[in-house]
Image (cartoon, rainbow, N blue to C red):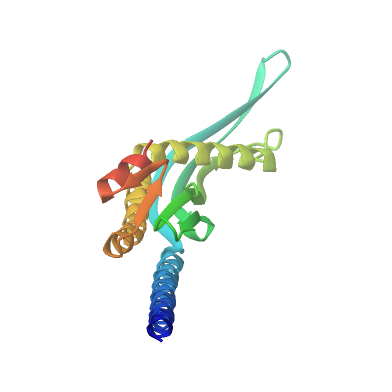
Amino acid sequence: MLKRILVGAGIVVAIILAFKYCQFKKDYDAGIEYNTNLIQQQILNVGKLVVTEGHFSEVITYKNQQKYFMNMISFEKKALVVVNANVTVAYDLHKMKYDIDEKNKTITILNIPKEEITINPDIKFYDVEQSKLNPFTGEDYNKINKSVKANLAKKIDKSTLKTNAQNRLISELSKILILTNSMGWKLQYNGKVIESESELNQDLKL
């Protein structure tokens, strides 16, 4: 009789423990799912087009000379070219690739898209001089446009526009870092755990 009572009590205890384990696992899984959904939502919020704008101006003189009769006669064309350009540096974070490891509570940024530079020049011509034997043609305008964009690209590289754009990028990515830290998760990039905004900044410049 005592044996039956002990066996019955053991079964009851086992059922209770199994129930508690199932309840704990259910709560744990629910917590993981909640955290994962929250992080995914934050990444979606960050995933947008980060744009920094700048304005550049320059003045160039374009000259071209056509020579005839063994260079004895020449016909020159020239113009003063005034350029005003709006430039944007953008990061499309919708293209960012990442991996969520629920088991190890780790977010790994796999790829951050490169910046996209757009140059929109407004080109105006002044003091145009040309002749019928050496007029301005579409080829001249193509050369001028190509030269203008090349000069602007050099100015952009020497300016703070790219740096400002990268600072905005880091500011957006830091939102993910803050969230993961607050939830006890880790953020990884370039094979290392990122623990501060300065580390994120340093890794992006590698």
Measured from the top left, where is residue 190 in percent x and y? 42, 41
Which residue is depicted at the point 30% across and 65% down? 183
- In the displayed structure, does residue 144 sit left or right of residue 1? right
Q: In which quarter of the image is residue 1?
A: bottom left
| Camera-side residue of 119 and 176 | 176
| Camera-side residue of 47 and 149 | 47
Q: Can residue 140 be seen in this view?
A: yes
Q: How many labels sit on residues? A: 0
Q: Residue furthest top?
A: 70
**Quadrant the C terminus occupies:** top left
Q: Is residue 86 visible?
A: no
| Camera-side residue of 4 and 50 | 4
Which residue is depicted at the point 40% across and 78% down? 10
Q: Residue furthest right?
A: 69
Measured from the top left, where is residue 99 in percent x and y? 49, 55
Which residue is depicted at the point 46% across and 63% down? 47
Q: Quadrant of residue 64?
A: top right
- In the image, residue 78 sits, relative to residue 107, either above or below, namely above
Measured from the top left, where is residue 109 in percent x and y? 45, 51
- In the displayed structure, does residue 172 sit left or right of residue 75? left
Measured from the top left, where is residue 55 in percent x and y? 38, 52
Q: Quadrant of residue 51?
A: bottom left
